[in-house]
Structure formats: structure tokens, C-alpha cells
Amino acid sequence: MPLPREYNLVFKDDELTYTAQLAYNSNNGFLAYAGFSHGFKSGGFNLDPAAAALGADPRFNSEKVDAYEAGIKTEFANGRIRANLAVFHMDMKDFQVLEFTGVQFQTFNVGAAKSTGVELEMFGQFESGISVNAAVTYADARYPRNCAAGVVGTAQTLATIRSLCGADLTNAPKFTGVFGITYDKEITDSGWKMLANFNINYSDDRRTSTSPLDSNGLPIPLDIQESYFKMNARLGFTTPDDRFSFELWGTNLNNEITRGITANTPLRGGAGTRSRIGFVEEPRMYGITVRAKY
């Protein structure tokens, strides 16, 4: 196993970030816009004790992104119904990936990553105190097939990067959606208010591991989190003077057990027989919240 090694290196970088946007507003409930932005996330050092072992460079580069977006925002039915539609595309250079290898965490750069998609949101407000919201997103977040071009690193890191080229990004489902309904209104002449909300979230299949392939070039079993729905609800009451509120809430009411990250079990198994560990997301949770204003 590589032994820890001291190093004395400097990381320094700077970048100009900027945004440009053009919009048309009809002043009659319709807005169209298009924009471009250039962003930056600083690089740095891997601080694992073995990050510089065998002469490896523990530094990783800054990530840069060029983002394009265009869309429309509109409302009708006297402003009670609103709809937003947006299309977007992002080009990312030196995309930073954090991986748990089974014995250490390391951040490395992939030469390029892209994300292209469309999002639709709708909101409705009704006089009875009922409002509804719905949204659906399609996003194709992927590594291009030439994502390893120009990348330098250790043989192991380069092999991992090459396995990513042509694959989806980690935890990047193609389709996601949400639907919710809310009741928010005074319920008695005394001024007591009630808030009741129910929403359901959907996520498409997603890969929960960094690399889609094992070191033998074959897919790793059980790394795909299948599509799922999660339901949440909240019921609350507020006193007439707005000083106190009481809420009963629950999340993931259907107790859908899902994984956020899957990685190697430290020092157990090899290619084709590798032991894996999964980090499970929150199960069903419920509770009571009391708020007071003074």
C-alpha cells in the first residue's frame, strides 16, 4: 500500500465570472428571456495522507462552466395560474469528481461534462385557499466520449476517467417531477389559520457510484437506484395573533428506501467479486414543530 508522503506545493487560480441576459416583458403576463453565464469553482488539494504517495500530485484543477438558458414565464386567469418553461445547456471543463475508492476520498478532474435539458413548472391559486404546483424536468447530464482528452494523472485515475466517458453523471436521473397541493386559510371566525400540504416527488433511475464499470470493464451490480416516488405531508395551525403555530409533519411517508452513494467496501474483494457499501437516504420521518414569536 502506498505510504503517506509530505509535500510542499502551492495552488493559485483566479477567474472572471460574468452573466448576460436579454429579456422581453409584454407587461401583460408574458416574459421571454435568454441568458448566458460563466462560472467557476476553485480547485485545491486532496488532504488524504496518501494523496501524494508515489510522487502523485495531490492538487486538482478549478472547474469552469458556461451555462446557457432560455425560457418563457406566463400567467393567465387573472394571474391565478402561472407557467414557466426553460431550456438549458451547460458545458463544464475540468469537472470535479469526488470518489471514495474504498480506502480514501479523492477529488480529480474530468476533462469535460455536459448537461442539457428542459423544465416545466406550473402554479395555480384558487379563491378557496387551495393552491397546486407541479413541475417536471428532463436533464441529460453526461460525460462526452472524449472526456479524458488532455487529462493528466495517475494510471488508476486515468483508468477511472476513461470508464466515465460516454456515461451519465452520478446521481443524475433523466426525469424528475413533483406535484403538490396546499390548503392555507382561516378556518374559523376567531382567526385561527390552517395549513395543510401534500406533495409527491418522482425520480427516474440513477447511478449512485462514481464509475459505471469495474476494473475488469464490466458493469458493477446493484449500483443503479431504480425509479421511485416519495410522499410528504404537513398539517399546521396558527393562533389568531400569529404568535404560536403547531405543525405535524411527515417525510417519505411511503418509506421508500433509496441509496445516495454506492462505493467499494474497504479492502474486500476484487474485480467481479467486489464488496460494495451503500449510503442510505432518509427513511420515513415524522414529528411535531412548535413555533413562538415574542
Image: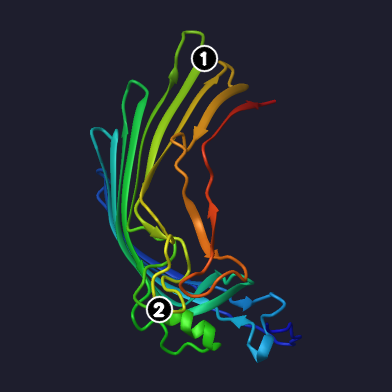
Assign a secondary structure to mark 2.
loop
In front of the other: 69 or 56: 56
- Compared across the picture, whether 166 is left or right of 246 comes to left
Q: Is residue 155 visible?
A: yes
- Compared across the picture, whether 289 is left or right of 17 comes to right
* Residue lying at 51% horizontally and 72% vertically, measured from the top left: 97
Q: Is residue 24 visible?
A: no
Location of residue 148 in the rendering, given as x and y in whole percent from the top left corner: 42, 84
Give the position of the C terminus as an image quadrant: top right
- Specify the amino acid type for callout 2: Gly
Give the position of the N terminus as an image quadrant: bottom right
Location of residue 134 in the rendering, given as x and y in whole percent from the top left corner: 32, 41
Tag 1: Cα neighbours inside 10 Å, few (<14), some, or many (≥20)?
some
> Which mark identifies residue 139?
none
Assign a secondary structure to mark 1.
loop
In front of the other: 32 or 181: 181
Picture quadrant of residue 224: bottom left
- Compared across the picture, whether 81 is left or right of 270 comes to left
In front of the other: 12 or 35: 12
Identify whether 251 is placed above or below 112. above
Location of residue 257 in the rendering, given as x and y in whole percent from the top left corner: 47, 45
Location of residue 26 in the rendering, given as x and y in whole percent from the top left corner: 24, 49
Q: Are marks 1 and 2 in contact (CB under 8 Å)?
A: no
- Compared across the picture, whether 9 is left or right of 196 comes to right
On the image, numbered disc 1 is attached to which residue? 192
* Residue lying at 34% horizontally and 53% vertically, measured from the top left: 204
- Specify the amino acid type for callout 1: Trp
* Residue lying at 36% horizontally and 64% vertically, measured from the top left: 21
Count the marks: 2
> Which mark identifies residue 217?
2
Tag 2: Cα neighbours inside 10 Å, few (<14), some, or many (≥20)?
few
Calculate the distance from the C-alpha at mark 1 to the C-alpha at mark 2: 63 Å
